[in-house]
Image (cartoon, grey):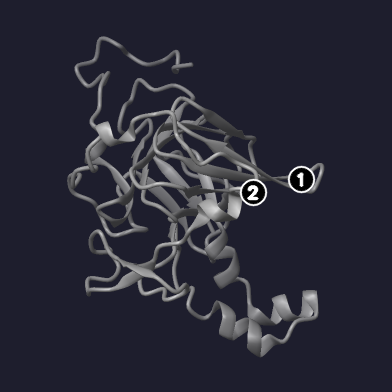
Amino acid sequence: MATSYRDYTSPNTQFTYDLRNNTFFRKDAGNFIDALGIQQLNTLGNTSLLDIFLTTGNVIEPHIHQNASELVYCVTGEAIVSIINPFTYQLLNFNIKPRQVANVPQGWWHYEVAMTDDTHLIAIFDAPVPEVIFGSDILRLTPASIWAHTYCLDEAKVKDTFAPITRTVVIGPPFGCQQGANPAPNQGQSQWQHTSSQYPHYDYSSQYSSQWPVNSYYDAAAYTQPPEYGQYTHYPELAGYTYYSPSQPQTAYPQQYGYSAAY
């Protein structure tokens, strides 16, 4: 619900917003995320959303939202929403197509994989400032010696394995990744890497074909390729978003509005 102390007679009261003006993350022209929080629309109550566009095989990397539940709604295309149930220790895969949803409870480990091009998802949160911890940050910021000692691993191999992860991934695979036999050309330029590169076109459909139908009953072809949306700021220093460095204390979060990531 909206805050009771808001002055709805104020000329600064906002009732509408264009998400194209607030890009949270952009990998290329077909894979990007726009965001809406209370900083962008000040009449919002306990809610916010991400507008997600993906092409086949691209992944919203494994992560958790420590202060919000997430409802994922499929607008076009098809996606697998995967969550780990911390009570049953099961990995659950939910195939969603247009007009279908998958719900992720607060604090649960999850990720989304696009099964088709022009996949459009809307992620709705029950918090005006949802927080996020990305898997890439856990992997790269935890010392290799801790991984090795805790799980009886070879420290040199751990360092070598995680060495390519130098920043938050958000949408994977990263640019320049050459895994797989059939890399496909980029659909645009990364905001991190402005040289020509390729990433693989993964066939996730075959991986899940025994569990999930691959035929969509929705005409996604009626939707055009997402346009080049507005201006965006180099991630992670995004306007309206709050990030915490590893050395910054986590005892209290400032009252900022947007999307916050705690490392």
Percent position of residue 261, x then y: 49, 51
Compared to residue 63, the image places residue 201 above or below, namely below
Q: Which mark is residue 109?
A: 2
Q: Amino acid at mark 1?
A: Pro
The answer to whether residue 46 is seen in the rendering is yes
Q: Is residue 128 left or right of residue 26?
A: right
Q: Is residue 14 left or right of residue 57?
A: left
In the depicted view, which residue is nearer to us: 87 or 231?
Answer: 87
Percent position of residue 213, x then y: 56, 39
Q: Amino acid at mark 2?
A: Trp
Q: Residue furthest bottom?
A: 156
Image quarter where the C terminus lies is bottom right
The residue positioned 44% from the left and 21% from the top of the image is: 45
The crowd level at tag 1 (other Cα within 10 Å; few <14, some 14-19, many 20+) is few
Q: Which residue is mark 1?
A: 86
Q: Which mark is residue 213?
A: none
Rounded to the nearest angstrom, the CA distance separating label 1 from label 2 is 8 Å
In the depicted view, which residue is nearer to us: 103 or 186?
Answer: 186
Are the residues flagged by discs 1 and 2 in contact, CB closer than 8 Å?
Answer: yes
In the depicted view, which residue is nearer to us: 92 or 156?
Answer: 92
